[in-house]
């Protein structure tokens, strides 16, 4: 099984390259078959994993979002519609089509903002797109299990995430 470990303990945004590993869930042994290393691992609480990963983003959102962003005005509704279309284009298409559609959606958002008299429509669209993207990532991360690789003294060396196992 190919597993990518985190570069820093409990920081789930930077990962090393993937290594061929084997996991023994009976004895909680992580074996890196390429580096010939063996460590124990322990399961990390899924709620703690989500908090550690998304708390910094939540703080950024707390400082950038306000009451206006959740009101049902014409501007916010149009911006959310463009954000949903942009998120769909980025998540459903690949390569050049994704890039082309993203640019087209942003340009159409700018032109629409010009015609409705709101020059900041693109900024709101991108802001709401980031919110939707983070919500999608949280939903996808809820399907993962996180584990900590520990040394003999119990110190966390690294972490890894894998899809949830069926019991």
Image (spheres, helix red, strand yellow):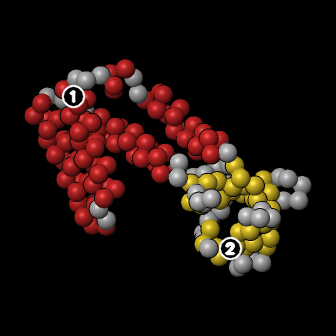
Residue 30 appears in view: no
Residue 21, labelled with which disc?
A: 2
Lateral position of residue 89 relative to residue 36, left or right: left
Residue 7, labelled with which disc?
A: none
* 142 versus 75 height, above or below: below
Q: Residues within 10 Å of mark 2 (few under 14, many from 20)?
A: some
Q: Residues within 10 Å of mark 1 (few under 14, many from 20)?
A: many
Residue 166 appears in view: yes
Which quadrant would residue 118 be assigned to in this image? Answer: top left
Question: Which quadrant: the C terminus?
Answer: bottom right
Q: Residue at x 22, y 57 (%)?
A: 101
Q: Residue at x 78, y 53 (%)?
A: 156
Lateral position of residue 79 relative to residue 142, left or right: left
What is the x, y in percent for residue 92? Answer: 30, 58
Which quadrant would residue 129 be assigned to in this image? Answer: top left
Q: Nearer the viewer, residue 117 or 6?
A: 6
Which residue position is annotated with label 1? 75
- Spatial separation of the CA atoms under disc 1 and disc 2: 50 Å
In front of the other: label 1 or label 2? 2
């Amino acid at each position: 099984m190919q597993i990518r470990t985190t570069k820093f303990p409990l920081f789930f945004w930077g990962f090393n390259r993937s290594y061929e590993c084997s996991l023994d869930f009976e004895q909680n042994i992580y074996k890196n078959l390429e580096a010939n290393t063996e460590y124990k691992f322990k399961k990390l609480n899924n709620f703690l994993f989500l908090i550690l990963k998304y708390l910094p983003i939540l703080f950024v959102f707390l400082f950038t979002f306000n009451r206006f962003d959740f009101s049902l005005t014409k501007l916010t509704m149009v911006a959310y519609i463009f954000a949903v279309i942009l998120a769909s284009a980025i998540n459903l298409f690949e390569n050049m089509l994704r890039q082309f559609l993203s640019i087209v959606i942003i340009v159409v958002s700018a032109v629409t903002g010009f015609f409705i008299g709101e020059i900041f429509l693109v900024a709101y669209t991108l802001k709401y797109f980031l919110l939707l993207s983070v919500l999608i990532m949280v939903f996808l991360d809820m399907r993962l299990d996180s584990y900590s690789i520990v040394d003999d003294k119990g110190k966390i060396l690294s972490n890894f995430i894998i899809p949830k196992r069926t019991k």
